[in-house]
Amino acid sequence: MSLIDEFLTFKEHSQGLAGATIGKYRQYLERLEAWLGEQDMDFLSADDKALEHFCGLHQHKMGVMPRSRRPLVSAVRGFYAWLSRAGHRQDNPAALLEYPRIGRRLPVGMSLSSSERILMQPDLSTFIGVRDAAMLYVLIGCGIRVSGLVSMNESSLLWMDEDGKERLVIKVREKGGHERLVPAPDETALMVRAYLGHEYLDTVDRYLKDGDQVLWISTNNRLVSPDRYHGEARRMAARTVNAMIDGYGERAGVPKNERHPHAMRHLYGTELAESGVDIMQIQALMGHRSPKTSENYIHLATRTLAKSVDKANPLRKMRTHVSSLARHLESHHAKHPSS
């Protein structure tokens, strides 16, 4: 077994690293191995200067942006820390390897008006329209990732009684298999009920081996033969959801950079922050590993702050050169908020 295989086996079985991350780590380390070979070195003879050059200047010359170099540096650091612990090396030349400095990248969220336009696109007289609408209501109303959406089974829907009122809570499983519970708004619950109650759904074999049922089903998968088009094979793919949102968005005149599921997730996070939801609650609802990720939405939550500024800033209380124009703009916006 190669050193790369030994390391990745350790990361997968001892530390529970996700399969997708394992694959990326393999690519990074294989690139490093090939580059070291060109320098007449290998993993066991490479020094700190060689690793610094590979992770820095070499990646820059290859056109790799600083943000994309961070996971590569993480893979190299972790690999050499393991080589040292496992006794393959006495030293760790990657111990002082620095991550590239990058600025904060704020997420781009879908606007409320864009969301409204997209939600009105599905044809609710058809099964596909009801299905698509229900998925959109889950994405916008619960802020889950598209991976969490398509992995849902019927057991992911928890219907609870809340003081005589039905409440839908969605069990979400996303990155790394981590699970969380997200209460759904009434609008989402109503659309999900409409989907579950559609007569076409009763004609589809959605059953899995454990007795559960796939929730969001495809209706036309040409890659699967008719005799095998049941159970897991019926599950919608993430790329299909992406294409669905892009299509509806284009038809509704939504900007290209808003026509994707993550923009809906960012809208959800921003609205939570705008409404004063505590950062720890935002972290729990959105499934962030670190509160720092949730802070992005605090930075985006400007409307509430803007209202406070409009009401209390000192210029508002003075007569200035532009006071009358400012009042006119405010009055015009109040009458025509979308203009």
Image (cartoon, helix red, strand yellow):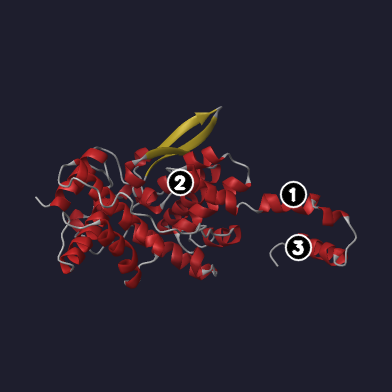
Q: Residue 98: percent from the left, percent from the top?
A: 37, 54
Q: CA distance from mark 3 to mark 2?
A: 36 Å
Left or right: 128, with 37 as reference point: right
Q: Residue 109: percent from the left, percent from the top?
A: 53, 58
Q: Amino acid at mark 1?
A: Ser
Left or right: 268, with 144 as reference point: right
**Element class at badge 3:** helix
Above or below for 114 versus 7:
below
Q: Earlier in the sequence, mark 3 or mark 1?
A: 1
**Element class at badge 1:** helix
Q: Amino acid at mark 3?
A: His
Q: Mark 2 and 1 residues: CB-CB less than 8 Å, in contact?
A: no
Q: Nearer the viewer, residue 106 or 83?
A: 83
Quadrant housing residue 97: bottom left
| Crowding at mark 1 (Cα within 10 Å: few <14, some 14-19, many 20+) | few
| Crowding at mark 3 (Cα within 10 Å: few <14, some 14-19, many 20+) | few
**Element class at badge 2:** helix
Q: Nearer the viewer, residue 126 or 239?
A: 239
Q: Which residue is mark 2?
A: 192
Q: CA distance from mark 2 to mark 1?
A: 37 Å
Quadrant housing residue 53: bottom left
Is any part of residue 330 visible from this angle?
yes
Q: Nearer the viewer, residue 303 or 9?
A: 9
Q: Residue 327: percent from the left, percent from the top?
A: 84, 62
Q: Quadrant of the C terminus?
A: bottom right
Q: Residue at x 32, y 44 (%)?
A: 176
Q: Earlier in the sequence, mark 2 or mark 1?
A: 2
Q: Which residue is mark 1?
A: 308
Above or below for 50 versus 194:
below
| Crowding at mark 2 (Cα within 10 Å: few <14, some 14-19, many 20+) | many
Above or below for 185 versus 328:
above
